[in-house]
Amino acid sequence: MILWITCITCAVIHLLFFLFTFTKLSFYKAKDKQGLRQPVSVIICAKNEVNNLRKHLPLWMEQAYHDFEVIVVNDCSWDETEDFLKEQKSIYPQMKVVTIPEQDKYRHGKKFAVALGIKAAKNEVLLFTDADCKPAGKNWIALMQDSYTQNTEIVLGYGATEKEKGFLNRLIRFDVFQTAMQYFSFALSGNAYMGVGRNMSYKKAMFFRTKGFARHNHLLSGDDDLFVNENTNQVNTAVQINPESFTFTEGKKSFGEWMKQKSRHGTTAKYYKGKHKFQLGLLGLTNLIFFLLLITLLIVRFQWKAVLLLYGIKLMMQWAISFGAAKKLEEKDLMWIYPVHEIIYTFLQPLFYLSSLFTKNQTWK
């Protein structure tokens, strides 16, 4: 009976997150508005990314926006990146290249490259993406810029994973979707806690006013999520979920590569604000305990009809709310086997967390 009551309690707590937080994204209606359309500086850090630059540079440079520059930070590349950028600079006058020479005695993370890109930017509005990302269309800059209002200093966008064949790709996309549903919904609740460097924007003045990455400069990662976590408040953060504002990157091709990526990303979560660590921990832990107790109760045959009914109610409510969010982010195909995705995702999270505890990043790329 204690296990049954605990199972119900975990189900209720987990559902409260869906009912009071995730519905913010599920039922969100963006206002049809055009912002002030200020000049924008797009900043992209590249380390040995010549192949991706060849594919994606034209997509960034040919944006349908009246006033923008693209700053490519060549971070210690030893491939053909430098030569390629020199060639392209003559083609695209609005492109600026910042080169960091390789130094054996000084190892730096992505923050150093980002900071140099920001210092080189001539515009107040900064827009960030990665070399392995491509914008959904020519209106990417315009739409991310349109989210700014008088009080806005940070805009969070969606960095999606490209759809490919295979279950691993679906699982990676489900993980990306779940993360996005969380950080968008928290932001819409006035409680933003992270953003992704693949698609986010903020003001240059805020970066220097808050001393940039100074408080976590000793960490090689965290240029996106930790920066947002430290500087967001109830009124200065907006979201942009128009499909034309998305960026896309290829998913990892093996579980080992994905595990390595997730472990690296997870190294920063322990530096979040206390309230966010508690909320995110409670969200994940209650669902994990729920499934463990659900399996236990079914094995011991404790009122199995009531147990399955509880799971059915929880599943239907979660599915309905998640479907609304997936529709917004154009990930509806992930919903058709939602129960399978959720169970695997729930049991993988502790694995990723434990792996991050033993991960020591030496370089950001």
Image (spheres, rainbow, N blue to C red):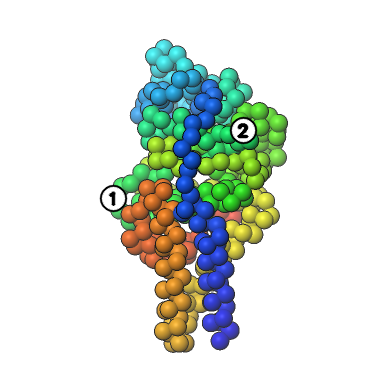
Q: Are marks 2 and 1 in contact (CB under 8 Å)?
A: no
Mark 1 falls on what kind of element?
loop
Rendered image quadrant of residue 362: top right
User: Residue 227 location in percent, x, y?
Assistant: 62, 40
The residue that appears at 39% across and 14% down in the rendered structure is: 91
User: Residue 13 location in percent, x, y?
Assistant: 57, 68
Question: What is the C-alpha distance between the residues marked 2 and 1?
Answer: 43 Å
* Tag of residue 362: none
Read off the residue under disc 1. Answer: 165
Q: Nearer the viewer, residue 27 or 266?
A: 27
* Tag of residue 150: 2
Residue 87 in the figure: left or right of residue 31 = left
Rendered image quadrant of residue 138: top left
Q: Residues within 10 Å of mark 2 (few under 14, many from 20)?
A: few
Q: Nearer the viewer, residue 294 or 201?
A: 201
User: Residue 19 location in percent, x, y?
Assistant: 52, 62
Rendered image quadrant of residue 125: top right
Is residue 328 visible in the rendered image? The answer is: yes
Q: Nearer the viewer, residue 102 or 22?
A: 22
Is residue 103 visible in the rendered image? The answer is: no
- In the rendered view, tell whether residue 276 sits above or below residue 109: below
**Of the image marks 2 and 1, the number of the one nearer the N terminus:** 2
Mark 2 falls on what kind of element?
loop
The residue that appears at 30% across and 53% down in the rendered structure is: 166
Residue at the limit of the structure toward the front, as seen here: 32
User: Residue 334 location in percent, x, y?
Assistant: 36, 56
Check disc 2 and give the amino acid type. Gln
Check disc 1 and give the amino acid type. Lys
- In the rendered view, tell whether residue 96 sits above or below residue 111: above
The residue that appears at 45% across and 50% down in the rendered structure is: 176
Q: Residues within 10 Å of mark 1 (few under 14, many from 20)?
A: few
